[in-house]
Amino acid sequence: KTDDVDYIIAIDTDSVYIALDELVRAAFPNGADDEKITKFLDKVCNDTLQKIINDSYQKLCGTMNAYEQKMHMKREAIANKGIWTAKKRYMLNVRMGEENVYLKEPELKIMGIETARSSTPEVVRNALKNVISVIMNGDESAVHDFVAKFKNDFRGLPAEKVAFPRGCNGLS
C-alpha cells in the first residue's frame, strides 16, 4: 500500500533519509508516545529494512561481478523531526542514535548549518543551536519569544562579539 507515497526525504552516495510517518500511523492508529514509536522503528529497521539493504547489496555484488560484497550500510539515527534547508544541510531531533538507546532528551544532529561555521560569530552560533532546539521541541510562540529576546540582547552586545572573524594581511 505504498504506491502513492514517497518515503525518501534525501539521498546521497552514502546515506538515505526515510520518512516512516505513514508506517507509524498505520501501526499506532490511536497514537503512541515517542519512546514506543522509536523502539518500534528500531525493530523495523533491524528486522526488515536492514535485511532488504543487505540483500540488495549482495544482489549488486553479483550484478557487478564483484569478487566480494564490501558495501555496508546501517541505521544511524531515528529522529522524530527533521528540517532540510539544502543538500547536505539539515537538522535532526534524534531520539535514538547508533548505540540503540532511547534518548529521553533528544539530541540535535546538525549538518552544514551555520552553527559550526567559523565565519559565523560565536554568539550567533550558540543562539542558532538554542533556537533549533526550541524549533524542534517547542512551539511557534516559543520560537518568536526566543528570537525577540535574542534580537534585543544582540543589539546590546559590543562590536567584537558580533563581528565576523576575519583576518587582514599586508597592512602597515
Image: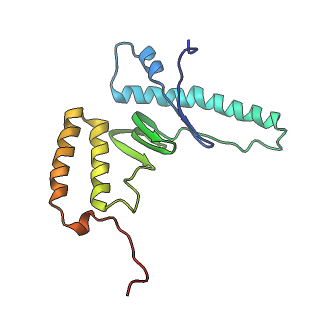
Along the horizontal axis of the image, is 15 left or right of 144? right
As drawn, 37 above or below 14? above
As drawn, 154 above or below 110? below
Asked which quadrant contains residue 156, the reply is: bottom left
What coloring was used for the rendering? rainbow
Along the horizontal axis of the image, is 172 left or right of 49? left
Q: Which x, y percent locates residue 42?
A: 48, 31
- Assign the C terminus to one quadrant of the image: bottom left
- Residue at screen point 75% across, 41% down: 69
Asked which quadrant contains residue 61, the reply is: top right
- Assign the N terminus to one quadrant of the image: top right
As drawn, 29 above or below 52? above
Which residue is most to the front? 172
Q: How many numbered circles are shown?
A: 0
Q: Nearer the viewer, residue 48 or 162?
A: 162
- Residue at screen point 45% across, 14% down: 26
Q: Which x, y percent locates residue 71?
A: 69, 42
- Residue at screen point 54% across, 38% down: 75
Q: Which x, y percent locates residue 68?
A: 79, 43
Q: Which x, y percent locates residue 12?
A: 59, 41
